[in-house]
Amino acid sequence: MSDYEFPAENWYTQEDEWVRVENDRVVIGVTDYAQQQLGDVVFLELPEPGDELKQGEPFGVIESVKAVSDLFAPVTGEVLERNTSLEESPELVNESCYDAGWILALAPADESEFEGLMDANAYREYVEEREGSEDGDDD
Amino acid sequence: MGDLQRTPLYEAHRRLGARLVEFAGWEMPVQYTSILDEHAAVRHRAGLFDVSHMGQIHLSGPGAVAAAERLLSCPVASLREGRVRYGLLCNEKGGVVDDVTVYRTAADAVMLCVNAANVDKDRRWIERQLAEGPDAAGTRIDDRSQETGLLALQGQVAADALGRVAEAGVRRLRRFAFGVFRVADVEALVSNTGYTGSPGYEIYVPAGETERVWNELLARGADLGVVPAGLGARDTLRLEAALPLYGHELDDDTSPLAAGLDRFVKRETGGFIGAEAIEAAAAAGHAQVLVGFELEDRGVARAGHTISRDGEVLGRVTSGAPSPTLGRSIGLGYVPPDAAAPGTALRIEVRSRSLAARVVATPFVTTQAQTHSRVQER
């Protein structure tokens, strides 16, 4: 089983994204688990600043060499900024998923939505549960 | 992943931290570290692949060569002992049952190396054809897929790395030649072949000895840069070389000529199952032919995406991926012949986006191995 880093200051979603509150905005990205599962990220399709995202709905896609996956809005809000470095350097998602590989900054519309997110410990359990079931057929 | 088959290297892959995925009914390593790194290793140094999931069907006896000649699109009788060819098993409609490599193992014997997903299908197909044909009495069919392990050592340093653990003669093997050599003290059939577009070898060993050979090649080749490589890199490598993948570019309803495989088809002599239908389809004109394309917009084309031009649907992408060597996305797909010329502008419909693409000549990436194979196939 791989080692994953899940910083304690972030919130996490069941879709393997992280959310970090920075004053009146939130920054989002994909987790260390997600980037390892995806493998080499080669392209992201992201909304424009000003677009409105709705919690739980797909807002973009992330393409690795092997596969394409949807990105889901962890909270409702308006896109303030997207990480334009990812256009030239999508590998930042693999190299630094919590810092240089951040994806969007949002103005959250409803802070009560945070109650549905997981903290780092809960998310780690959630990941381990799935890893366990993947390994379940090993005698 | 219940009910999936595992190769003799399953535990070795787990210890190496491979990510295992389902492929053709097998639990196989898709990557160990990163597809991009493993791809680059093969292009610049070497990668070692476990392809033990592939099948080996041996035909032997007085009728075997004639039977193989009738089953395969490529010439077999003229194939000298110790030589390999690529060919197609075709059906009567001129579609492709499987694409295989055929090894002339003896005057009266050949080995077919077949796709993992098609082993049972191929064996049944061959049995049925032989039962209905004139060669049945004199031909034995022996499926040794389960007892055979297969490693592919591919890349610029493959010869050096193999030379360290194998008998010296192995280095004299020319492209598309094979022989039996001791490799890591194991008797192995080694061919100068591969599915990556880089130079390299395929090494057939008894299943129980596969791990020994795997470990020796990795250990003794480590300082040359030999690394384990997974099916993810194998797919991007073969796509750069524009080598077809059964189920994507080839299937039961597609002519090998539509797929651009003319040079592996006995067009003058015919005499193989499907020959008449293949020629009839060619004479009538193929509705679609296989082309390579590069994306001009950012994004990734993948199998199943629609190819269009001026709003008109032309066909579908059969394989697509970012090319690690070229740094842009490439793909293969079927389009009408009038859209097949290099330079033709196409659109690839990727979800909500329409991406600009351009038909290009294949292979996308030309390597030493391919130049050699081209010359020797003629």
Image: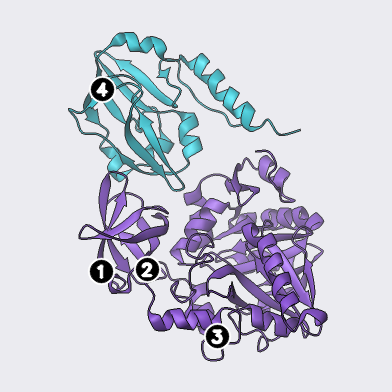
Chain colours: A cyan, B purple
Tell me how far mark 1 sits from mark 3, CA to CA: 30 Å
Looking at the rendered structure, which numbered label has been put on residue B266? 3
Q: Amino acid at mark 4?
A: Leu
Badge 4: residue crowd in 10 Å (few <14, some 14–19, many ≥20): many
Q: Amino acid at mark 2?
A: Val
Tell me how far mark 4 sits from mark 1, CA to CA: 41 Å
Tell me how far mark 4 sits from mark 2, CA to CA: 43 Å
Camera-side residue of B274 and B352: B274
* Residue at mark 4: A106
* Residue at mark 2: B291
Q: Amino acid at mark 1?
A: Thr
Badge 1: residue crowd in 10 Å (few <14, some 14–19, many ≥20): some
Image depth: mark 4 or mark 1 in front: 1
Does the residue at mark 1 contact the one at mark 2 (Cβ under 8 Å)?
Answer: yes
Does the residue at mark 4 contact the one at mark 1 (Cβ under 8 Å)?
Answer: no
Q: Quadrant of residue A29?
A: top left
